[in-house]
Image (cartoon, coloured by chain):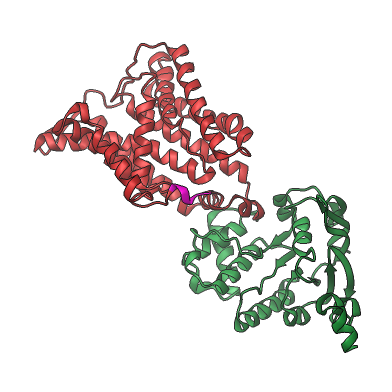
Chain colours: A red, B green
Amino acid sequence: MADFIQLCVNGLALGSVYALAAIGFVIVYAATGVVNFAAGQFVMLGTFAGVGMITQGALPLGLGYGAALAAMALFGVLFFVLVYLPLRKSPVVTIIIGTVAIGIVMQNAVLLSFGSWPFRLPSPLDGIMLQIGGAMITAHAVMVVAVTALLIGLIWLLFYRTALGIGMRAVAQDVEAARLMGLPVNRLLALSWVLAAMLAGIAGLLLGPMWFADVNMGDPIALKAFAATIIGGFGSLPGAIAGGLFVGLAELLGASYVSSAYKDLIAFGAMILFLLVRPQGVFGERIQDRG
Amino acid sequence: MTLLHATGVSMRYGGLMALSGVDLAVAPAEFVAVIGPNGAGKSTFLNVLTGLVYPTAGKVLLDGRDITRAPPHARIRAGLGRTFQHGRLFDRLSVLENVMVGAAIRRDRSEAALRDAAHAVLDRMGLAAEADQAVGSLSYGRRRMVELCRVLAGEPRLLLLDEPAAGLNSGEVEHLIERLTELRATHRIAVVLIEHNMGMVMRLAERILVLNFGSRIAEGPPAQIQTDPAVLTAYLGEGYVHAGG
């Protein structure tokens, strides 16, 4: 039982990171129609922003987190200006391929800057263990779940209780009508990219102490976040959260109770099943219903 | 003082002349209707005024300022408001949120101010009870009213209405006419109305501009337009007018 609780908490922590990446995925998709295949590299960049500020820059943790997130916000703006804006009138497929290309560029830029040797990012709760139901859990894992829950609450407040969020939801549904209502559409679209980049940054900072910071870490995250959004439902925030948690739990429980060689089988098997039987996922819309 | 002044507006799509030298001046609080048979260029003219398309010739002035090449959102901020022939509401937002989006061009854009402004418009237009409903769940007639509320929430000085009565039943049309009459009386908003419902046009409009094949064929008060031979010919055909006249 203690093992099961431990696996569940660690699975929820990993799933929280996937959920944050998936939420960033969904925010960008809902606002722009773009499936951002660089989403995993966004998370990788977030981890390395932390490595740059905290491990290499020797900034105190709080300041390092702030600086890393500011860098990610700036990256979101740059991505919007240098990648999305020049391509926005191209077919969506072109933009999607553009995100794949930028993902490769990001990965190699980090490889050039930091080298191929993996880093470890510290956690503010390093070395602290909690006993829950007889299981020993790292305090960091609990913090990851708590921070994710807090962020989900803040995102809900932003989208449903602020004028800015209502504007973003309007732009996500009909850009032209939103423009005709006088909404600053470009600013709101830019904000979607900034928000996605910052969420990925937080996911990266939370993931850093759980995994090693490695330039190849973005690929599995992108696949898991993609699986999470398919299972939860494309375009759905609750779907991204539920899908992310499911994939994280399935990964750790699968590794423990099935085989570590097949740990991804449950999540990707579920994704394929959803694509075949219920393409709209648990909460969302079918991909082909968009545009 | 003229609020809107469009002069010599032409719009060419390849070999098709959708608009040909159309003029329109609208004074503050004036109610003008633009009518014409299908394909006359009415919606194209409204699109030019809104900035959805830029004319191939001619000028559009708002408060004397040239807005011919201004983007739509700049015109909305300058005091223009528009509804669409096929209402473009944000279906996944509630009625209140849709109207809040319309109010977002006001100076005070705090959530509380937008919420209050949206509630005030919904109260005035008789939609307060539906404020928290999802727009997607409303009847067609109520959706048209929500669209009108959304544009009114931005406090436009010039309202462009693109066939607001299309698809409404007679009771809903009557309700719409009453609301528009009230608006004129209380808020002194200028209106340019495109509408096929002639009963509505004749009751509301002070002046009517008639287009046919992209050109102006008549302009004047309703009583004059109703008997204008060129208008009757455009609507009823050459043979009917001659036989009837």
State the residue at coordinates (61%, 53%).
A178
Q: Is residue A288 above or below residue A84?
A: below
Q: Is residue A92 above or below residue B81?
A: above
**Does the image show residue A210?**
yes
Along the horizontal axis of the image, is B205 left or right of A38? right
Expressed as whole percent of the image width and height from the top left, the position of residue B64 reads 87, 55
Along the horizontal axis of the image, is B20 left or right of A60? right
Expressed as whole percent of the image width and height from the top left, the position of residue B69 reads 80, 47
Residue nearest the viewer, comparing B110 with A145: A145
| Magenta-tinted stretch | A287-291
State the residue at coordinates (38%, 16%).
A55
Residue nearest the viewer, comparing B122 with B135: B135
In the current view of this chain or complex, which residue is farthest to the bottom? B244
State the residue at coordinates (86%, 55%).
B10
Residue nearest the viewer, comparing A283 with A142: A283
**Per the image, is A190 magenta?**
no
**Does the image show residue A12?**
no
